[in-house]
Amino acid sequence: MRRLVLAALLLAPLLPPGPASAQTQGNWVPARVAELQALDKVTARISVLEAPLDEVVRFGTLEIRVSACHRRPPDDPPDSAAWLEVRDTRPGATEVPFRGWMFAASPGLNMLEHPVYDLRVLACR
């Protein structure tokens, strides 16, 4: 939790708050679809998911909702960032395993901590 708060404080000036709008905000360009890579650690199955904004995408027992997705303009170093909320639908799972920003260029900065699944942002389109 401490790592999440620290990341939010350090990165808050870089990202626009809340969901995407139709115009460029700072050095980030809003996008409508997040491209995610999901890994099932048990079967070693890797899948690339397309997650439109505010729609639920399923992978195994996970429900993934992307509320905002932003990418850097072409003249800046490449990066994408997405605000994700991930829920586990297994019986008995009560906590939300992940809610926050994930960055394509820094996947270890703020990551999903789940015993069976791994998830990362590849791009925003």
Image (tube, rainbow, N blue to C red):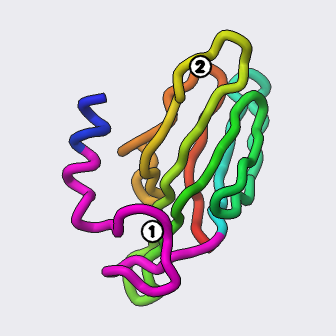
Q: Which residue is at a point 64% across and 58% down the rendered structure image?
A: 54
Residue flagged by tag 2: what amino acid is it? Pro
The residue shown at (40%, 77%) is 28
Q: Residues within 10 Å of mark 2 (few under 14, many from 20)?
A: few
Residue 13 on the magenta span: yes
Mark 1 element type:
loop
**Number of residues whose C-alpha sits closer than 10 Å to that of mark 1, classed few (under 14), some (14–19) or many (20 or more):** some
Instruction: From the image, tell me which residue sits under label 1.
Output: 79
Q: Residue at x 72, y 18 (%)?
A: 90
Residue type for callout 1: Asp
Q: Main secondary structure of the magenta part?
A: loop
Task: Judge from the rendering whether residue 40 lies leftward or rightward of residue 94; answer left or right.
Answer: right
In the image, the segment drawn in magenta is: 7-32
List x then y, in percent, for residue 37: 66, 49
**Residue 53: % across, % down:** 64, 62
Q: Which residue is mark 2?
A: 115
The answer to whether residue 16 is left or right of residue 12 is right
- State the residue in front, 102 or 47: 102
The image quadrant of residue 18 is bottom left
- Find numbered disc 2 in the image and state the secondary structure of the residue it sits on: loop
Q: CA distance from mark 2 to mark 1?
A: 27 Å
Residue at horizontal 49 percent and vertical 71 percent from the top: 20
Is residue 31 depicted above or below 73 in this figure?
above
Dividing the image into 4 quarters, which one contains the C terminus?
bottom right
